[in-house]
Amino acid sequence: MSSWFQKKINSLELYTIDVILGRREDAGATVYGALLQVLSYLFSALSQARLWLYRHRILHDQHLGCLVVVVGNLTVGGTGKTPVVEKFARALHDRGRKVAILSRGYKSKAPPFWRKWWYALTHTQEPPPRIVSDGEKVLLDSEQAGDEPYMLARNLPGVIVLVDKNRVKAGAYAIKRFGCDTLILDDGFQYLPLKGRLNLLLVDKTNPFGNGHLLPRGVLREPIKHLKRASYVFLTKSNGQRDLELEALIEQHNPGVDIIECAHRPQYLQRFGVAADAPGAREPLTWLKGRRVVAFSGIATPESFEKFLRDLGAKLMARERFLDHYRYGEDDMAALFELARREGAECLVTTEKDAVRLAENRSLPLPIYYLRLEIDIIRGAANFDEAVARLCFPQNNGSRV
């Protein structure tokens, strides 16, 4: 794809986001918004028809004979799903489960067409899923695996991470090849072919359902009423204050559902391109206080990341926002370092998800750090381990299922 064409696609995507969020009020935005609304009605009809087909057993979901935990959301991006999946997988692994995370590998680099064509000609079965981690080694980079699967593989030794659009196939492969007894479907709430025993729905408390419209006019993947499909609801990005109106809406669509409220907590700063055990590789959060930094990110909700930095006392000399899952090139990094030089910044700070998309073999005129986040339970369980025990080991205080 040419750089000119890629820039046009990026511009259209940014314009669409502005229209969805109501940042544009010109005549063109009004017309474009009306077109998106028509497409949204079509998307809603297709989404509900698909669910109806599975509910009435015209299309069949499959059981793989083990614990299947689905983690997902009703909206696209921004709920802080990856840290929840990571902590859930670690807690289950620590309790003796053989865990595999199944991901579709959003925006990962697919094998070339000729290789898939050759495989189809020479094999009678579909190719196996891509193994991001076999539990001992990380086997693919972020471009081949996708940002989130690579992050999960790097942070979860002992946990299998597989990428495939067909997660029934991936789950069966995890059971047969690695002996897994627990499958976690990353971003799997809309993946209906594989039957989950637990559906954990994440709702971003700071922006639960966007403008209330379905894609592409809004950020909803399915109607709000489908809250009823959740076994448990996790309210993420909480500030500790209860939102009774949001809780009432959840209760209206899913009476009696357990609500677990959690927050993403900064843990430390990790220096990019430096071995984790090297001197100066990790800095405490207090290191940011009064420090002049340039923040950059390519995530769905950069506002929360930038707020973390300000709350920790950093002086944001400048901020740069890129499209979600943006893959940084040499020109981008050169421009960021030049911006930092002009603003007198001491370092650049980004997110962990962005750090996996940076080339490690380049010289760094200034240090780059990424902010490590983890999940804390605020309400609904004493801590995350209790939540895991209650959700996945409900019988006899921890018996296996």
Image: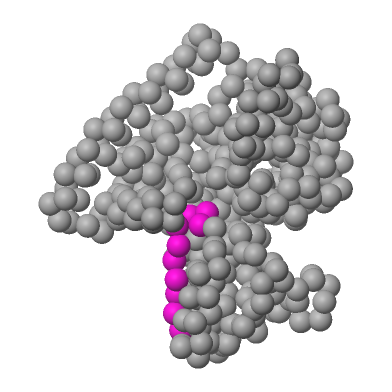
Residue at 28% of width from left, 33% of height from top?
Answer: 39
Residue 55 in view in this figure: yes
User: Is residue 7 shown above or below 360?
Assistant: above
Q: How is the image coloured?
A: one colour
Start and end of the magenta stretch? 317-326
Q: Give the residue at x 65% y 17%.
A: 62
Visible residue check, residue 84: no
Image coordinates of residue 389 in percent, x first then y, are 75, 41
Residue 248, quarter of picture: top left
> For residue 134, which quarter of the picture?
top right
Is 233 in front, or is 355? 355
Q: Quadrant of the C terminus?
A: top right
Q: Residue 190, position in %: x, y?
A: 52, 31
Please provide percent x and percent y for residue 267: 67, 69
Whether 191 is among the magenta residues is: no
* Residue 388 appears left or right of 239: right
Measuring 42% from the left and 49% from the top, which residue is drawn there?
Answer: 208
**392 and 187: which one is in front?**
187
- Left or right of 242, for residue 157: right
Farthest left residue in view: 27
Q: Is residue 151 above or below residue 257?
A: below
Depth check: 307 or 260 in front? 307
Task: Give the image location of residue 116, x and y in percent.
Answer: 65, 29
